[in-house]
Image (tube, rainbow, N blue to C red):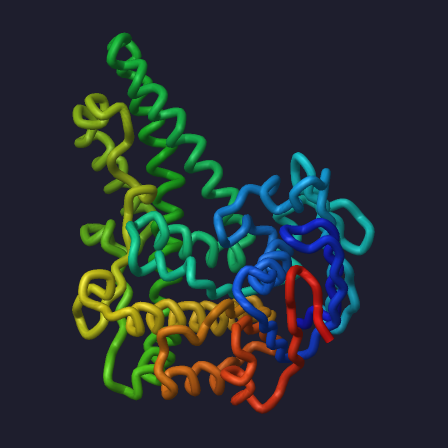
Amino acid sequence: MKINRIELENFRNFSFLEADFDDVNIIWGENAQGKTNLIEAIYLFTGAKSFRGAKDKELVKFDSEKSRIKIEFDNNEREQSAEIIIDNKRSVSLNGVKNKRDELSEELKAVIFSPVHLSMVKDGPRERRYFIDSALCQIKSNYRKLLKEYNRALSQRNSLLKDLVKHPELDSMLYIWNQNLARTGAKIIYQRLKYIDALMPYASEVYLGISSNKEKIELKYSGCDEFIEDVYDIEEKLLKAFEESKLPDIMNRNTTKGPHRDDIEIMINGKSARVYGSQGQQRSCVLAIKLAEAALLKKMTGVEPVALLDDVMSELDEKRQDYILNNIKSSQVFITCCDKEQILRLKKGKTIHIEDGKIID
């Protein structure tokens, strides 16, 4: 797939911008000029939230009522267009027809690397769960719905836990929510385990290349050491875990077990990348996982995702930089940098110079 053109109106620091794209696109300029904003606008067409954690209303240019983003793209040898309007909420259309936001993810696939994703290694389990869930949403059409069902059941169980403090007669209802939570939670854990198993060969190959065969990466789903990879067995074990944690859950007024508390350990040569990894090693881990995500996405959907690489070269030595630049397998890539000479070792690609929310010729 390939994005041919974009139009932005009142998005972030852009009043208006039009740009045509090539297979390789180098977006360069000083910091805080709009490079990442352009990458962010493209990523919204996957149906996801901003990768920077911004709410939709924060994407609208200051003192403007709404923003508009439009792209023209080729997918399956078919020319298409999509548009996003953001005011109080986000509305989307595909080829002039209004669509649900999630439906865009069926048409446009993208993998994003940004410095904010270093939190996948550096921070707590939430960031790693978010990565794997976001990746699965692009591969499994029903996974987003499954997450919503689980979160709804989790919220209802937590509400009941709070009520039980003053109304112990409601105790019999807890088993009903335990069953609902175990059923959907088991499916989530099962999909996560399968995804990690499929991702690991790609991530291992990329990381060995980045480290010149000196280091090995490993991913381990740490929340289910006692689970075997059968969704029904997982459901039974989850149900048992909810029942055993009943008293502490009532005391905490919160569900303390389940996929919403699980973690994915990232290790280098058997040691925690979060605890022992250098800045360059941690960045290399995220890059390896992201490039592996792109390869797996192509294998499982048949669609080659757009690669969005924001400030990808920082804190990497020249050997690691060259490996990344020469092993981008996506049909289309967008790379942001402050110094275009650093990226021009690619020896190909269109350069787009952005300054103060404008393209400079």
Please, is residue 104 above or below residue 310 in the view? Answer: above
* Rendered-image quadrant of the N terminus: bottom right
The picture places residue 331, in percent across and down from the top left corner, at: 61, 78
Residue 253: percent from the left, percent from the top?
Answer: 27, 23
Quadrant for residue 212, please give it: bottom left
338 lies left or right of 278? right
Front one among 239 and 82: 82
The quarter of the picture where residue 333 lies is: bottom right
In percent of width and height, residue 31 lies at 52, 64
Number of marks present in the image shown: 0
Q: Is residue 158 visible?
A: yes
Check the image and name the residue furthest to the right. 96
* Residue 172 as seen in the image, left or right of residue 67: left
Residue 302 visible? The answer is: no
Q: Quadrant of the C terminus?
A: bottom right
Is 9 placed above or below 235 here? below
Residue 325 lies, with reference to residue 302, above or below; the image says below
Image side of residue 107 versus residue 268, left or right: right
The reply, left or right, for residue 273 in relation to residue 80 is: left
**Toward the viewer: 289 or 190?**
289
Q: Residue at x 36, y 34 (%)?
A: 181
The residue sitting at 48% across, 74% down in the picture is: 295
Q: Which of 266 and 137 is in front in this view?
A: 266
Q: Position of residue 138 (x, y in %)?
A: 53, 58
Q: Residue at x 17, y 70 (%)?
A: 270
Q: Which residue is drawn at 33% across and 76% down?
A: 204
Toward the viewer: 8 or 251?
8
